[in-house]
Amino acid sequence: MRVVFAHHEPIDAGRARWVAIVRSLAAVAELTPVTWFTPDSPGRVREYAARHLALQLPAGLTIATLPSIHKRMGLTLNSVFFRAFRKGVAQARPDALWLRSDKLAAHAAHRRMKAPLVYEAHLVGELWARDRGVSERKAARLHELERDIYGHASGVAAITQGLLDEIRTRFGYTGPGEVIPSAVDTNLFKPVWQGGDGRTVAWVGTLQFWKGLALLLEALELAPGLRLKIVGGGKPEDEQRLRAEIERRGLGQRVELTGRVAQADIPLHVKTCACAVHPLPPEHSISARFTSPLKLFEYMAMGLPIVAADVPSAREVLRDGQTARLYQAGDARALTAALTEVASNGALASRLSANAAAEGARHGYGQRAARLLALFGQATSPSAG
């Protein structure tokens, strides 16, 4: 099977999505030839993979650079890339066109491109827009864009069951669909937990509003015996707001901020921590139902005891008392109690650690690639039409 993947944005090492994109592409290319249309040069892609992911790209992945104009007068001229994308797909004549950009997928739908489209869905744009407080007009435009995508798609890979169910209900999609969650590089992330120090909680990720950091800081205030280690970064304004909130709450001596670190260095930062936390807020659709966070799978693969919000997206992966301690989402006191319990109970932490590591080993990128390839086969079979 010949697969084409395309993404109109250049690689941004500060965004977690690129970890998933590049690792998934490499894993699928181990199984079947993949051509990747990108505005980046092959050298830039390989440099990112080696430096940030400790990954050597396979021979089955062909990187094809398309012309693109970015950030002139604050605007990205997608039309330049999109025009080259159409020509490239027509020449490549792939068996499957694999996209995860809603803009690019909608363009393929509008142009009625002949290559069977398999869309990898990570959220419902309309609901995500409302979570961010944008106008109803923009939310409505996103609904129309997604309606076009699912009206044209030959297959859908959704990262959670909640997302796939929403897509089928909201857009009337009836074609081949599979739940294919995020994954972890099990060569890089292996069991490293050393029993914990009894007091340090690890949080790994980017500083986005829906990641639950505000609630975590509130919970930390209620537990003077605990410390917090935040591994990751974000936009400068987000980091400034976080530092200001930490100081406002009087937590400056109990919170460590590492800033962004390479994936290969994450285990070094968390291996001695008492537990890891995944405090997703329940009020946002993306966190409650649609997210499949990379860091959650990394926590599991490293064998970290996990404390996580009891939201549907987490329950698709975690089991309370077995692979994690789940607490009532949105409740700071419940989060405090769960963190304190896991940090102070060595037997519980060890059990959670062992079970999480075993579960994490089943979510490698090789398994994810096999599931994607199976979906490509369903979407391109004669019966799919």
Image (spheres, grey):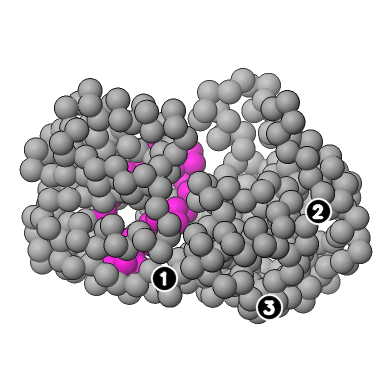
Image coordinates of residue 284 in percent, x first then y, are 45, 35
Give the quarter of the figure containing the N terminus: bottom right
Q: Tell whether position 287 is magenta.
A: yes
Q: Residue at x 38, y 33 (%)?
A: 239
Foreground of the two, 152 or 47: 47
- Of the residues shown, which amino acid type is indicated by label 1? Leu
Q: Which mark is residue 66?
A: 2
The correct choice, above or below, for 55 with respect to 140 in the image is: below
The correct choice, above or below, for 241 with respect to 358 in the image is: above
Image coordinates of residue 377 in percent, x first then y, are 72, 73
- Of the residues shown, which amino acid type is indicated by label 3? Ala
* Residue at the disc numbered 1: 188
Mark before the other along the chain sequence, 2 or 3 = 3
For numbered disc 3, what is the local secondary structure? loop
CA gap, disc 2 and disc 3: 20 Å
Q: Tell whether position 170 is magenta.
A: no
Q: Residue at x 68, y 46 (%)?
A: 9
- Of the residues shown, which amino acid type is indicated by label 2? Leu
CA gap, disc 1 and disc 2: 31 Å
Give the left or right position of residue 57, taking residue 288 as reference.
Answer: right
**Quarter occupied by residue 359:** bottom left
For numbered disc 1, what is the local secondary structure? loop
Q: Which mark is residue 59?
A: 3
How many other residues sit within 10 Å of disc 1, few (<14), some (14-19) or many (≥20)? some
